[in-house]
Image (cartoon, rainbow, N blue to C red):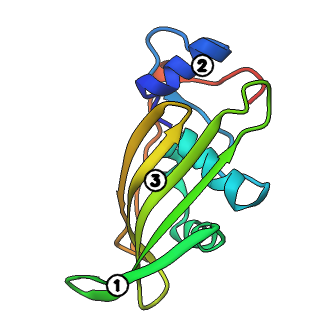
Amino acid sequence: MFLTDDLRAAYQRTGPPVPAGVSWEQLAGLPLPTGGPAAGLGMLSIFPGFLGSVDPQDLLALLQSATDVREVGPASEPGWPGTAYSFTVATKLNGPGHTPVGLRGTVDVDQQGRVRQLDGQASFATTVSQVEITFGGFGLPVSVSPPPASQTWVPPGA
């Protein structure tokens, strides 16, 4: 996962610090967080970059289990009709700070039940991040190369 300035700052505050000269964090995998929809969406609000790595069907299942989901009308792009939904979830993380986290926005779902677009705001304490993700090319093969090892950091215990 690309190390954003916010993620670097979070590591700096809570440790361990990210070494200079690295731009990527190596993660063992990105399963959706456990603990119910509030915990899952709350975790995604802390690290909105995870949203681009989550399978669209898993994301849809997580969004459907949120406490406040409402149909807002039709949605479409060339080649697919669907429905737009608004969603809101807010929770507090356990721990000494009981940090408030949340994710709210809209999600467009096509008639086959696939997430096509997600727009929203992710909040972690007082930091708010805009999230805009478009999904497409379902079923097409992709080729992905990892970043060079010299630019990758593996956090202790990962």
Q: Closest to the observer: 73 or 146?
A: 73
Q: Which amino acid does label 2 sit on?
A: Tyr
Instruction: Give whichever of discs 3 and 2 has the lower sequence position.
Output: 2
Instruction: Tell me if residue 106 comes above or below residue 145 in the rendering.
Output: below
Q: Closest to the observer: 47 or 42?
A: 42
Q: How crowded is mark 1: few (under 14 residues within 10 Å), some or many (20 or more)?
A: few
In the rendering, which numbered label is found on residue 10?
A: none
Circle 1 — which element?
strand
The image shows residue 18 at horizontal and vertical percentages of 56, 14
Q: How crowded is mark 3: few (under 14 residues within 10 Å), some or many (20 or more)?
A: some
Instruction: Give whichever of discs 1 and 3 has the lower sequence position.
Output: 3
Mark 3, mark 2: which one is toward the viewer? 2
Image quadrant containing the C terminus: top right
Q: Name the residue under label 3.
A: 52
The image shows residue 8 at horizontal and vertical percentages of 50, 20
Alpha carbon separation for disc pair 3 and 2: 21 Å
Residue at the limit of the structure toward the left, as seen here: 78
Alpha carbon separation for disc pair 2 and 1: 40 Å
Residue depicted at 47% across the width and 57% down the height: 104
Residue at the limit of the structure toward the top, as seen here: 20
In the rendering, which numbered label is found on residue 73?
A: 1
Instruction: Tell me if residue 136 comes above or below residue 38 in the rendering.
Output: below
Alpha carbon separation for disc pair 1 and 3: 24 Å
Q: Which amino acid does label 1 sit on?
A: Gly
Circle 3 — which element?
helix
Residue 11 in view: yes
